[in-house]
Amino acid sequence: MVSDYRIKGETGEWEVVIGLEVHAQVVSNAKLFSGAATAFGAEPNTQVSLVDAAMPGMLPVPNRECIRQAVRTGMAIDAKINKWSRFDRKNYFYADLPQGYQISQLYHPLVGEGEVTVLLDEKDESSARTIGVERIHVEQDAGKLMHDQHPTMSYVDLNRSGVALMEIVSKPDMRSPAEAGAYLRKLRAILRYVGSCDGNMEEGSMRADVNVSVRKPGDEFGTRTETKNVNSVRFVMAVIEHEARRQVDLIEEGGTVAQETRLYDPDKNVTRTLRSKEDAHDYRYFPDPDLLPLELDDAFLDECRKSLPELPDAKRKRYELMGISAYNASVLTAEVETAGWFDALLSNDVDPKQASNWVVAELFGALNRLGVSIAECPVSPAHAADLLKLVADGTISGSIAKTVFEKMLESGDPAGAIVEREGLKQTSDTGAIDAEIDRILAANADKVEQYKAGKEQLFGFFVGQTMKAMAGKANPQIVNERLRAKLS
């Protein structure tokens, strides 16, 4: 992995080594081992089965849909799918873990090695980096402790207890905050395309444990720290910046980095010690005696593979083959909702290049101004296509199209109705255009002489004056043609 990101210290430059463990909540109606609901925002302890609460005699039963979603995710990153896998018990005590252990997969995960390719610069294909994924295993989530409900006690909400998680473990392949941010954004996009996780980091359905170590370039890996439960791309990048600098300063002052678990304080932009880092033997892993190994047959795997949608990289390449710029294709495929809206626009037989330029420049600008997502866009893809076609066939000019689009956003009316109602059709009447050009040239005889003497930049002045005189309704192509003829 090549990177020019370095931490400068008193003893020279240091390289940062980064790995991410991403916990992604699986999209399913029920939990991993029970039939309890998984909806976000329910009243505390209203979505808890006897299994989730670890009542005596309750036995877990794997949720087929959760396994299916994890397999589909593995296929989306070209990972090895293990037809035989097994659940293990990870033993530790915590107040929001009723069983006293977590059912996870250590020794035989469901999904093996895969990879995620990212672009560090959307305009430059040579900026591509491939980040290895070591494994994806499924496990159950713990509950949630609430410390702000009572002055002397903490309350426990078990609604999240038993919810299915995919833990997606990268290899230590990243060497800069930018690479880690690009990896997390791309992984989130893939999960949302597949539909296996909603990627909502604000609600906690996707969060990252950030592993950071530093070394002199070419040396062996240093001691790493793990910063837990970071819930935004920006915070992940900030953790890496802070933790790398902290470790370099510590080493150069003669100290040693402790292998430990840390927490990030976004208000102060610092990490702090949570506990010393446990090793696998501290958790006393052993095969879960209540669960048989998972054995996947070919029919199940074929169904998973056939259910996959067109993924971001394939969609981006398809767009580029249509003549869409690499930058626009990258932007349009970054979010599944955007790609879906744009595909619906293309289905209305519009020019792909023209459509992509309009979406990236005009539509995104309007959505940003309105503070809404593309899913909430007041203009449908079909109505947007009608607007683009009016420009393409010369009915309205590009400048008038901006006015029409604003009125579409306000009223929800189709472009054609607005153009007819407000008399915004573009004119190609050469007689009317010639008359205005003659008037403008006569009124600016001095500038005409300057133009003929070689000051060709004045041509834009004449075009602008003509368009202004005709309230923007003149066909720009004809205006240019008639002006050149009269000025030559």
Image (spheres, rainbow, N blue to C red):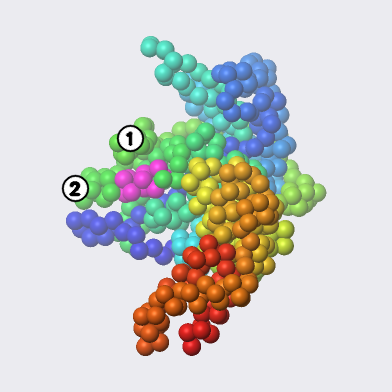
Disc 1 residue crowd, few under 14, some 14–19, many 20+, Cα 10 Å: few
Residue at the spot x=56%, y=31% of the render? 141
> Viewer-proximal residue, 304 or 92?
304
Residue at the spot x=53%, y=77% of the render? 480
Q: Is residue 152 left or right of residue 98?
A: left
Q: Is residue 186 left or right of residue 67?
A: left
Assess whether residue 237 is covered by the magenta stretch.
yes
What is the C-alpha distance between the residues marked 2 and 1? 27 Å
> Viewer-proximal residue, 361 or 243?
361
Residue 276 visible, this orientation: no
As drawn, the label of residue 150 is none
Name the amino acid type tagged 1.
Answer: Asp
Give the residue furthest to the right.
299
From the image, give the main secondary structure of the stretch colored magenta: helix
| Residue 104 falls in image quadrant | top right
Assess whether residue 217 is covered by the magenta stretch.
no
> Viewer-proximal residue, 323 or 234?
323
As drawn, the label of residue 267 is 1
Q: Position of residue 333 (x, y in %)?
A: 59, 56
Where's the N terminus, which quadrant?
bottom left
Specify start and end residues of the magenta stretch as a single range. 235-244
Judged from the image, the secondary structure of the residue bearing numbered disc 1 is loop
Residue, disc 2: 253
